[in-house]
């Protein structure tokens, strides 16, 4: 009986290894098709920098569970806020984004060593851990960046997204990465990414990521679960590279505290349109991606 059980354990382990190998191999094949559909290795490798400009429309709302869970309270009077963005990017890991919405300017960037962000209501702040790709670039603007991001992903199967049959790739952040991005007061428990690649076109049609954070305090631990879903559409070739020119992003943040009255759900919707894209910008040097002066002088690092 013991030998039989041991044999079953070995067979089960072998089946799991084979299944995992198949999931990884399938993911790599899907990414190869994605690179080909985006323009091919030669076209993508020829890009060393890019510029993009577009328009955005945003609306935020809040659903307070402590008030019955069904009453909808809209921030900013439910008004739609409009604005625009400009993105500059250069290999490797250099990017700068400026977003102007209703007179408020939000900036973010990476100098290759650290990523930072700056808002009117918050001082310049450096993100912990290694610089990560800008989400705006992953929304159909930078196919090479998206392919590199999912290089170690697995294929979970198929799903229909926006009437497109898609392959589903999933990537989970490693424990060491989560620890590097956490601090004494904020712990990142989980960070998962899903990419939905059209079986018909080979292109990325939806990107989803989910964060679970724990904010520690003397009073209680508060958990935040944030989910972002970006749908990309209207792919057009620019110098042989397929770029998504329109899209919609939905952000949902759910706060969980020890007291049920503190539970809230916040939702933000954004639609965006890309108006200009250009590659291999002349004169774009590393000096264009320096962090803000106050952050640099303060010597802040992740």
Image: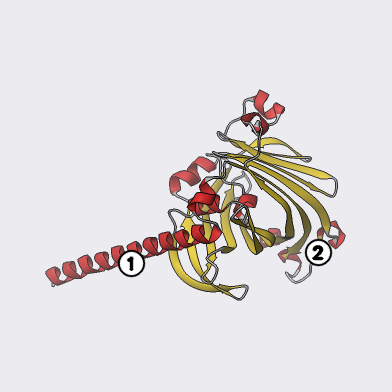
Nearest the viewer among 192 and 36 is: 36
What numbered label is drawn on residue 73?
2
- At which x and y percent is residue 272? 73, 58
- At which x and y percent is residue 9? 22, 67
Q: Secondary structure at mark 1?
A: helix
Q: Earlier in the sequence, mark 1 or mark 2?
A: 1
Tell whether 170 sits left or right of 100.
Answer: left
Of discs 1 and 2, which sits in the foreground?
1
Q: Residue furthest top?
A: 297
Nearest the viewer among 10 and 188 is: 10
Tell whether 45 sits left or right of 25.
Answer: right
Can you see residue 263? no
Q: In which quadrant is the C terminus drawn?
A: top right
Q: Residues within 10 Å of mark 2 (few under 14, many from 20)?
A: some
Identify the residue at horizontal 29%, vertical 65% (top origin): 18
What numbered label is drawn on residue 257?
none
- Give the quarter of the image for residue 69: bottom right
Identify the residue at horizontal 56%, vertical 35% (top origin): 112
């Amino acid at each position: 009986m013991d030998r039989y059980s041991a044999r079953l354990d070995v067979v089960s382990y072998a089946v799991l290894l084979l299944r995992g190998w198949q999931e990884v191999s399938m993911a790599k094949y899907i990414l190869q098709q994605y690179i080909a559909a985006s323009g091919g290795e030669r076209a993508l490798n020829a890009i060393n920098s890019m510029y993009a400009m577009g328009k955005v429309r945003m609306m935020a709302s809040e659903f307070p569970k402590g008030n019955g869970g069904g009453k909808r309270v809209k921030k900013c009077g439910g008004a739609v806020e409009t604005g625009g963005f400009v993105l500059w990017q250069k290999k490797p890991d250099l990017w700068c984004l400026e977003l102007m919405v209703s007179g408020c300017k939000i900036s973010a960037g990476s100098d290759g060593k650290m990523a930072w962000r700056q808002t009117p209501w918050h001082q310049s702040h450096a993100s912990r851990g290694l610089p990560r790709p800008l989400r705006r670039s992953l929304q159909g603007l930078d196919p090479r960046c998206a392919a590199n991001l999912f290089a170690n992903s697995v294929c979970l199967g198929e799903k229909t997204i926006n009437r497109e049959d898609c392959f589903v790739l999933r990537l989970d952040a490693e424990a060491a990465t989560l620890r590097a991005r956490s601090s004494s007061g904020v712990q990142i428990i989980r960070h998962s990414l899903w990419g939905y690649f059209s079986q018909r076109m080979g292109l990325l049609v939806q990107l989803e990521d989910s964060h679970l954070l724990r904010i520690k305090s003397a009073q209680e631990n508060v958990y935040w679960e944030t989910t972002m879903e970006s749908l990309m559409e209207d792919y057009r070739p620019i110098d042989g590279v397929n770029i998504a020119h329109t899209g919609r992003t939905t952000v949902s943040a759910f706060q969980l505290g020890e007291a049920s009255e503190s539970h809230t759900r916040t939702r933000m919707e954004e639609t965006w349109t890309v108006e200009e894209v250009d590659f291999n910008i002349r004169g774009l040097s590393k000096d264009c991606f320096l962090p803000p002066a106050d952050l640099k002088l303060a010597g802040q690092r992740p």
